[in-house]
Image: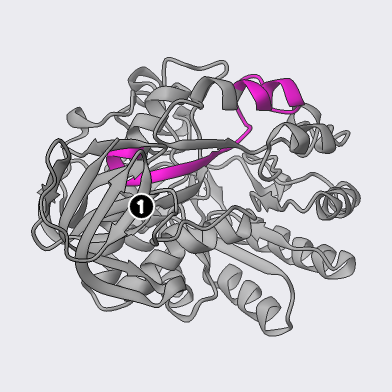
Amino acid sequence: MDVLIKNIHLINPEQNLDTVTDLLIENGVIKRIGKIENINNVETLEFSNAYCVPGFFDMHVHFREPGYEQAETLLTGANSAAEGGFTGVAVMPNTSLAIDNGDLVNSVLAKTKSHLVDVLPIGAVTVGRKGEHLAPMAEMAEEGAVAFSDDGTAVKTAKLLRYALEYSGMLNKIIIEHCEDESLAGGAMNEGKISTELGLPPVPAIAEELTIARDIVVAEYTNSPIHIAHISTKKSVELVRHAKEKGLKITAEATPHHFTLTENALKSYDTNYKMNPPLRTEEDKLAIIAGLKDGTIDVIASDHAPHAVEDKEVEFTFAPNGIIGLETELGLTLTELYHKKILTLEEIIYKLSVNPRKILRLPLPRIEIGEKANLTIFDADKLWTVDKNKFKSKSRNTPFDKKLLTGKALAVINNNQLHIID
């Protein structure tokens, strides 16, 4: 893949790079940076008002394969990621057949090795994600697992979590926790006045907060890093902030739906607003935004969770949790955080590209001569309307259909491949 990109605004805060210039890529490698005349037999691209940054990476997605391919496959999920402007993703292990051994880790990598998007598997912490015995973590790490999680549930006991943290430390991997106390889980929405008005079974905020508090204590005891997935309450943000102030190795992520929506949306009984953790209060949403702004929350991740149409079109209580998010993530982030002057572009690049890779101990893409081209090109000001029927994902479960957004990916380059986004 040879391509010349003209008059592009290159930004990489890790390199102190911020310049408008030309970029020549040959065989997937950056060959020249600077003023370059058009070259015969080389595709020339020129984007108006566009930025080129290290390829975005989403460290929390669900692609449903193996076991529930009617909602998403590894390849359709990767296509959705590319369309959203991502060159890499980490897939969670809570598939129908849990990714809890080296063979399944290897299978994920083998099925996606030729794709533009790097699809990297996260291994289960426990066998079958049942919370009874540790899975063969060393075996999975050797086969290419980039982290470990029982996502969908928290690691069931403090004892198991302690052992998991100790093993993951020896393997230089991180534990990613879905923080929810199982004894308080199982409801359909956030507990409060609105859940009472709607007559829906609630999930209290303390279900998340209790588990985060436990995890922080165990991580401090073992002197281990731990990553908190999809943080959703004000108290949770405060717990992580306090842990960081103590110097503990705690990182956290937030989803676009948790910094854009609140429980008020559930008054429509639209199951596309049902998710876990549930949408919370306006106060919680503002706390997440504040956490993103002050660095308490390190990463923005979609928690892309595809479901077949027939599974979501049931009574609210019985509908599965989750929404797709890869193709709206960048647009929502730019609309809600950049254009409202909460985060700078550089801060967004850290949360969508640099920090996820740092947390997962992955190499950081660099925009310099001789480096592999791993790039996202986007227009921060492009107006577009979400149309779920144009998604590359197999699923359509989004609450953002027909929403006007400002900011969109235009192209991605990785693994010697170029994808121009519709």
Above or below — where is 270 with respect to 166?
A: above
* Residue range of the region highlighted in magenta in the rendering: 82-107
Kind of residue indicated by mark 1: Ile
Q: What percent of the width, then of the height, locates residue 98?
A: 68, 25
Identify the residue shown where x is 71% and y is 50%.
181
Residue 106 within the magenta-colored segment of the rendering: yes
Residue denoted by label 1: 30
Camera-side residue: 72 or 356? 356
Camera-side residue: 162 or 6? 6
Structural crowding at the residue carrying mark 1, measured as other residues with C-alpha within 10 Å and reported as few (<14), some (14–19) or many (≥20):
many
258 vs 329, left or right, is right
Q: What percent of the width, then of the height, locates residue 105?
A: 67, 27
- Please indicate, yes or no, whether residue 286 appears anywhere in the rendered image: no
Q: What percent of the width, then of the height, locates residue 251?
A: 62, 65
Identify the element where label 1 is drawn. strand
8 vs 231, left or right, is left
Residue 153 within the magenta-colored segment of the rendering: no
